[in-house]
Image (spheres, rainbow, N blue to C red):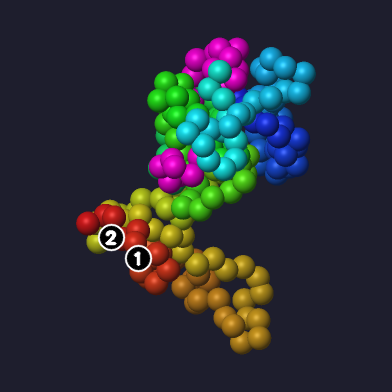
């Protein structure tokens, strides 16, 4: 079982996303356990203050290191990640790594930032979901959890569903590539003259597999050539 603890200022935000679809099924199967913790529970005043003005001046408020430290001392030591715009951009490889863990603690950054001492002394790494700024780390945390949970063994009914998808590694012509998933088709076979490729109707699984690899390469060259450059 993968146990995930989430430290946030807005626990109510997680109710919808974590009570639907694959994440919900993973929890019902007992394969994943998710606990949402309100950081205000570790504040020492009645207002539940968790932030303060930045030293040296500046706009906005900064989340306090003592609040987060007290929270972590309660949840226990484990792989701890701060979701922040300054972190390393999240990808499929990192999702696969995290899915193999037994426990994971995620801290949702917020406001104008988090006291630097949290990054320096309390977390193992910082992760971002892209080079843009959001109002907080709640949405990035949801994205990370969804991506990781689906890779936990037993969550998906068909394990092969995670083997041949976008951002997985493929071998084609004796070279390794990180590719996008091949084009997918379903019924009807012919809609408004838009036909399903004949090879997919042939029943020749070896040729279909080769076709999909080739189409994955074509698609990646067209839409995400940067993925190919990373392999050379």
Q: Secondary structure at mark 1?
A: helix
Residue furthest front as drawn: 57
Q: Which residue is located at x 70 percent, y 42 percent?
A: 17
Q: Is residue 215 visible?
A: no
> Magenta region: which residues?
67-90
Q: Is residue 87 magenta?
A: yes
Residue named by callout 1: 225
Left/right placement of residue 82 relative to residue 222 reads right
Left/right placement of residue 77 relative to residue 60 reads left
Q: Residues within 10 Å of mark 1 (few under 14, many from 20)?
A: some
| Quarter containing the N terminus | top right
x and y, in percent, of residue 176 in the image: 28, 54
Q: Marks 1 and 2, Cα distance to the nearest angstrom?
A: 7 Å
x and y, in percent, of residue 19 in the image: 74, 38
Residue furthest bottom as drawn: 193
Residue named by callout 2: 229
Left/right placement of residue 139 relative to residue 207 reads right
Q: Are marks 1 and 2 in contact (CB under 8 Å)?
A: yes
Q: Which mark is residue 162?
A: none
Q: Secondary structure at mark 2?
A: helix
């Amino acid at each position: 079982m993968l146990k995930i603890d989430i430290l946030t200022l807005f626990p109510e935000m997680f109710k919808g996303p974590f009570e639907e679809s694959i994440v919900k099924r993973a929890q019902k199967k007992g394969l994943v356990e998710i606990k949402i913790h309100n950081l205000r529970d570790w504040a020492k005043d009645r207002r539940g203050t968790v932030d303060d003005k930045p030293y040296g001046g500046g706009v906005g408020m900064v989340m306090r290191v003592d609040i987060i430290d007290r929270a972590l001392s309660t949840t226990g030591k484990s792989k701890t990640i701060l979701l922040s715009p300054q972190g390393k951009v999240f990808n499929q490889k990192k999702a696969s790594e995290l899915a193999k863990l037994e426990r994971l603690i995620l801290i949702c950054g917020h406001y104008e930032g988090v006291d630097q001492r949290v990054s320096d002394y309390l977390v193992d790494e910082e992760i971002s979901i892209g080079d843009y700024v959001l109002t907080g780390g709640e949405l990035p945390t949801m994205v990370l959890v969804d991506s990781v949970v689906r890779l936990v063994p037993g969550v998906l009914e068909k394990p092969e569903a995670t083997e041949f998808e976008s951002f997985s590694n493929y071998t084609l012509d004796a070279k390794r590539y990180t590719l996008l998933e091949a084009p997918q088709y379903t019924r009807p076979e012919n809609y408004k003259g838009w036909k399903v490729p004949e090879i997919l109707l042939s029943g020749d699984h070896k040729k279909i597999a080769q076709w999909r690899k080739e189409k994955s390469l074509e698609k990646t060259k067209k839409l995400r050539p940067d993925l190919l450059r990373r392999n050379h």
